[in-house]
Image (tube, rainbow, N blue to C red):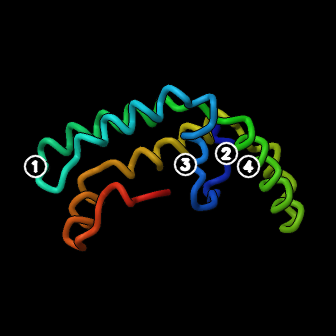
C-alpha cells in the first residue's frame, strides 16, 4: 500500500497545546486565538462554520516541534521493543505522521463539538486535545 506509518498512535492529552506554544508555532497561536475569539454562545452555526474552517486552516499550517518528533519516535521504538515490533521505528515517517496529527487536531474545530458542548452548557473554549 506504500503507507509506512503505523495505523494508530495515541498522543498524550495536552500535546496540541504544547505544540501550539512551541516557538516554531509562535505565529499560529495568536492567529488561532483571534479567530476563535469570534465564537460566542450566540454565534450561529453558519458563522461558526466559517470560523472553524479558518481555524482548521491555521492548525494545518502548524510545524511539528522537534521535541514532539523525537518523543513520538522514542515512544514507538520503546513500544516496538516491548511488543517484538522493532519495525515500528523504521515505519515512522514524520511528514505523514504530522499530517495525520494535524488532521485530528483540526477536527476539534467543527460543528459537531460546537453543538455538543452547547447542549451540555459548556464553553467551546474549554475543549482541548
Q: Work out whether residue 1 can be spotted.
A: no
Q: Which mark is residue 16?
A: 3
Residues at discs 1 and 4 in contact (Cβ within 8 Å): no
Callout 2 environment at 10 Å: few (<14), some (14 to 19), or many (20+)?
some
Q: Earlier in the sequence, mark 1 or mark 3?
A: 3
**Residue at 77 percent of width and 48 percent of height:** 71
Task: Kindly report the distance in space between the C-alpha atoms of the residues bearing marks 2 and 1.
Answer: 39 Å
Residues at discs 1 and 3 in contact (Cβ within 8 Å): no
**Residue at 19 percent of width and 71 percent of height:** 119
Q: Is residue 90 left or right of residue 62?
A: right
Q: Which mark is residue 120?
A: none
The answer to which of 101 and 20 lies nearer the viewer is 20
Residue 78 image-quadrant placement = bottom right
Q: Which mark's residue is nearer the viewer, 2 or 1?
A: 1
Q: Which mark's residue is nearer the viewer, 2 or 3?
A: 3
- Kindly identify which residue carries mark 4: 72
Q: Which mark is residue 44?
A: 1
Amino acid at each position: 500500500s506504500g503507507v509506512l506509518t503505523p495505523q494508530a498512535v495515541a498522543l498524550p492529552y495536552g500535546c496540541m497545546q504544547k505544540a501550539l506554544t512551541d516557538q516554531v508555532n509562535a505565529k499560529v497561536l495568536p492567529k488561532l486565538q483571534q479567530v476563535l475569539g469570534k465564537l460566542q454562545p450566540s454565534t450561529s452555526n453558519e458563522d461558526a462554520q466559517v470560523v472553524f474552517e479558518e481555524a482548521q486552516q491555521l492548525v494545518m499550517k502548524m510545524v511539528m516541534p522537534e521535541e514532539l518528533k523525537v518523543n513520538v519516535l522514542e515512544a514507538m521504538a520503546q513500544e516496538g521493543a516491548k511488543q517484538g515490533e522493532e519495525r515500528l521505528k523504521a515505519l515512522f515517517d514524520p511528514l505523514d505522521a504530522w499530517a495525520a496529527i494535524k488532521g485530528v487536531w483540526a477536527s476539534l474545530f467543527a460543528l459537531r463539538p460546537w453543538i455538543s458542548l452547547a447542549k451540555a452548557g459548556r464553553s467551546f473554549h474549554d475543549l482541548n486535545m
